[in-house]
Amino acid sequence: MALNIPGLVALIVFYAITFAIGIWASWKSKKDQKKGKPSEMIIVGGRNMNFFIGLFTATATWVGGAYINGTAETVYLPTRGLVWVQAPIGFALSLVIGGLFFVNPMRSKNYVTMMDPLQETYGNMIGSLLFIPPLIGDIFWFAAILASLGATMKVILDIEGYLAIIISACTVILYTLLGGLYSVAYTDVIQLIFIMLSLWICVPFALLNSATENIYYTAVQESYQAPWIGQVQTEYLGRWLDDFLYLVLGSVPWQTYFQRVLSASSPRQARLISYLSGLGSFLMAIPSVLIGAVAASTDWNQTSYGLPTPVERGESAMILPLVLHYLCPTYISIGGLGAIAAAVMSSADSALLSASSMFAHNIYRKILRKQATEKEVVCIMRVSMVVFGTAAAGLAFLSNSVYDLWFLSGELVYALLFPQLFCVLFIPNTNTYGSAAGFLFGFLLRLLAGEPSLKIPPVIHYPGCSLVDGVYIQLFPFKTFTMLLTLGTIVTVSYLVAFLFKRNILPRRWDVCSVIEDIVHSPTRPAMLLENHD
């Protein structure tokens, strides 16, 4: 296939527009920095983000490259189908739950990052330990979506994937570095609009292609492959439920989410942004579902792609760009490519800002250099953006491996961080001892469950664990089970240790975290282990 010149030109124009908007937003943020702390302006936009801009950026954060590509792939796969497309409903419910329960206690106390209440309650050292899973998750998330973009460019434009990875990473790093949340938010607006318009324009052409069977018929009838509605076999119900709860609850403890709601001008506005962005992310999945259904209803032998089919070639992960390229006119598929690029950038900049914000504010300022000036914190934030962005771009070349690492780090956030955040906000008097015990116990449990994608065999064989093609598969909802045990460990150890110290069963001189002293001075609220405890 020859180089797609019109597609390349269109992509360059889109990148130029995005970059120009990012630069304009950075100029706007510099004007507003005089009104407050520069670091808070970069991280939470001075807590005065326009409602509609906040809504667009919150929605665009979830509607990333993995979201639109993964939804189409899941519908297309003969072994999965629509019933396994959990992300749209899972993310929507997650944002509703976040708005109902988590936004108010976080926004009303004017926290800057998600890690603030954890450090305030459990101390800076435990906070730095809890920082590791979301940091790794953000970097691998950035890397995974860059890898996805590289593969897409190779299919549609016939250019080397590494060029797309490098150019995209440099663009995102530069405008995020210059403008912080303002640049991310304003570019998210144009990116989300582009995703919505481009994909919806592509859908009719794909549906009406002569090689495509009626999707209403193929939803329940086998044509070129199994019906795309799919089914959940009885033995997989536990795993289906586990994955669903992972998406609903595990999507809450991410800085990318809290960065949006903490930038709102009031708790009420933050809740509304959370609710409406959940609806928006659900609606944005509809074109991807239709494209996946089209792919499952297509006789690929009638297209220039030919046989074997994408799933037989192991290219199901690229089914969305394949449909755009082979079932839509060239000028339409170019717009679809722009939608994929926009989706990638809307998530990549969020992940980059999230990781650098937590490092500069929670690690550098609160642990490494407590006397750091605002200028110094901003400088460190920008340096960390370059470092994390470069690391993610390098990891993107690992392709499939980085996806596996991203999924594993996301599971660690669900199993380890969600219980910690829940306890801090809703269970009084949990303490550092419980937090540390819960983290270590949960981490050990997750490792002992094994990870097939990384060839880590399970030590714990939960009910339903079976050997499939030489690989052990856990069908028991072990991720949620691990999360609940971590939660129980935090609460149990916290109250047990406090009881032992208060009754003098353990000498109070052993209380190195000053838990008893904290309870005495703050009996009506959770123990607040301040910086002097570290």
Image (cartoon, rainbow, N blue to C red):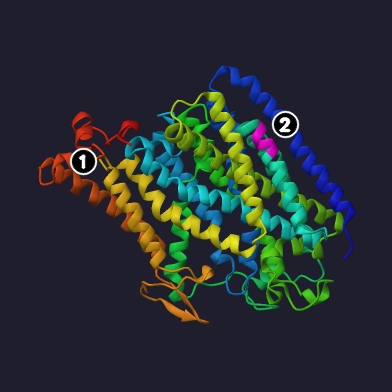
Residue 50 picture quarter: top right
Looking at the rendered structure, the secondary structure element under dot 2 is: helix
Percent x, y of residue 6:
89, 52
In front: 129, or 523?
Answer: 129
Question: Viewer-proximal residue, 19 or 381?
Answer: 381
**Residue 236 seen in render:** yes
Helix, strand or loop for disc 1? loop
Instruction: Estimate the spatial distance between the alpha carbons at disc 1 and disc 2, rounded to whole Å.
Output: 51 Å
Q: Is residue 188 above or below residue 244?
A: above
Residue located 36% across and 35% down the image: 120
Instruction: Point out residue 366 in the picture as x, y percentages from the top left corner.
Output: 43, 33
Q: Please give the name of the residue rendered at 70% of the width and 38% of the height, measured from the top-left corner.
A: 174
Q: Which residues are magenta?
A: 174-178
Looking at the image, can residue 48 be seen?
A: no
Most frequent secondary structure within the magenta stretch? helix
Q: Is residue 43 left or right of residue 466?
A: right
Q: Are marks 1 and 2 in contact (CB under 8 Å)?
A: no
**Lateral position of residue 367 relative to residue 302, left or right:** left
Q: Residue at x 62, y 66 (%)?
A: 75
Residue 502 against residue 453 in the figure, above or below: above
Which dot marks residue 285?
none
Viewer-nearest residue: 211 or 385: 385
- List the residue tagged with mark 1: 511
Magenta residue check for 400: no
Label 1 is placed on what type of residue?
Asp
Q: Kindly identify which residue carries mark 2.
A: 23
